[in-house]
Image (cartoon, rainbow, N blue to C red):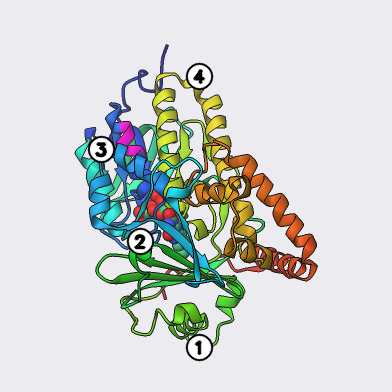
Amino acid sequence: MVGYSAGAEFPQSSVDAESRADVLVIGGGPAGATTAITLARRGHRTILVEKDRHPRFHIGESLLPMSMPILDELGVLAEVEAKGIIKRGADFPSGSSPGYQVFRFNRSLNPTWPHAVQIRRQDLDTLLIDRARAVGVQVLEATRIEGVDLGADWIRASARGADGEPLSIAARYVVDATGRDTFLGNQLRLKRRHRRHQSAALYAHFIGVRRREGEDAGNISIYRVEDGWIWVIPLPDNITSIGLVCGPDTLRGRAGDSATFLWRTLRSVPALASRLEEAELAGHLEATGNYSYECSKIAGPRWIMVGDAGLFVDPIFSSGVHFALETARRAADVVDTVLMDPAQETALHREYAHSHRQAVKRISWFIVRFNTPVMRRLFANPRNDWRLEEAIISMLAGDFYRDGGIAWRLRLFKVIYALHCLADIPGALRGLLQLRKRRREAFDSEPALPGSV
Ligand SMILES: Cc1cc2nc3c(=O)[nH]c(=O)nc-3n(C[C@H](O)[C@H](O)[C@H](O)COP(=O)(O)OP(=O)(O)OC[C@H]3O[C@@H](n4cnc5c(N)ncnc54)[C@H](O)[C@@H]3O)c2cc1C
């Protein structure tokens, strides 16, 4: 049997010995580093190319319990826990004391890990990239991939290093881990905006934000506003990450500058305003525009997308890094097998794409409806009949791929949601109008807001 790895010698023309690999991974975020670590450990010569230099700022600081075993497997869990804050749950506003409802991870349906971590992404991503180097991945930082030729016998990538010099890389397989840059999605014209949900986000680090007490000190807190939601993520050194996610029209039509608009919106929520009495901005504001999308294909002959490179959904449930790690690990299995036995590629790609899309589908229904009046009520007053609350906690913990009784309970939750809608027609209509507005914005909106303001 001739596999992609076992075939002809590496091409010689214009490619020096340093720039040949079994696998080229483009992008050094969690998805890219995890794929590279896994493949290098299995003996594949792996080059990872990252356009920035770590440590660098990135958003996505709240992790999920289901990511902890993966970080353990990668050999970085103890360091991640040491650099972060232990997160035992997620809290949402509630009318009853103490003013918020905690969904604690140790109460999930099939508890695997009782906590997650809140961590600066510059710390997480640096740990992972250092780990990649330690297991033998050739890491090229400050190097940008500019083009990939998938058509030839060998994949040929052209890159440009920090010194501006062009570089050519030959590989048998390419993994696109370029995150929201969606390198292959753009090159192959596969990227589509999410049909039903578009949002924009404005976020920053703050100092002096009042924390929850005791066991809840590491919770992520979610607050709702008229047209969106706010995250509050405690980080080490008294820093708190706070972000507003709202309709793109709301952000575009804001009165005043972004900082004034953000402060005004945060202070409009009384329960949050009281936590901000001594808070100050600790950095500059960042913005991300119209951001939900998916690629119509996430794998093809000798290429595969991992993490945000393939699709991105609203981060209300802090799912992004977990999807990055989980798809990376699954994609590494696919590439590992296909390099030895290319005949399995189509079937493995199909299975990879299907399981990922199903996992995303599991949470998308909740994301789209999260701000409707009926969903607000159900989240503020959860009930555990048929262990439904535990199933919701499993979803919040990142249990997107396994079943274990979760799927039918979430379906039952949808039925209960529908019954509540019937019992509250005005609330249901308001929810429907919100959904329609978001859908309209998805089609009317500009391509993107600036990355940094
Ligand atoms: C507003 C907002 C809030 C979020 N909050 C959370 C949260 O609380 N929790 C959570 O889990 N997720 C959150 N996310 C999602 C999270 O940020 C992403 O899902 C996660 O970073 C995906 O990891 P990744 O490795 O796929 O991509 P990334 O982390 O984006 O890494 C991609 C890497 O590829 C590099 N790259 C891009 N193009 C090239 C190129 N041509 N050549 C070389 N390198 C390239 C980039 O520099 C980057 O380092 C949030 C996202 C947004 C927008």
Determine whether the residue tagged by mark 2 lies in a helix, strand or loop: helix
Q: Is residue 197 or residue 448 the one in the foreground?
A: 197
**Quadrant of the picture in which ligand 1 is shown:** bottom left
| Image quarter of the N terminus | top left
Asked if residue 379 shows in the view, the reply is yes
Amino acid at dot 3: Val
Side of 279 relative to 338 (left or right)? left
Near mark 3 (Cα within 10 A), the count class, few <14, some 14-19 or many ≥20, is many
| Real-space Cα separation, disc 1 to disc 2, in angstroms | 38 Å
Question: Which region is colored magenta?
Answer: 35-39
- Splitting the image into 4 quarters, where does residue 444 fall? bottom right
**The residue carrying mark 3 has its beta carbon less than 8 Å from ligand 1:** no
Amino acid at dot 1: Gly
Q: Is residue 77 or residue 324 the one in the foreground?
A: 77
Q: Is residue 341 or residue 438 the one in the foreground?
A: 438
Q: Which mark is residue 256?
A: 1
Determine whether the residue tagged by mark 1 lies in a helix, strand or loop: loop
For the residues carrying marks 3 and 2, which lies nearer the camera in this image?
2
Residue at 27% x, 52% y is: 81
| Real-space Cα separation, disc 2 to disc 4, in angstroms | 51 Å
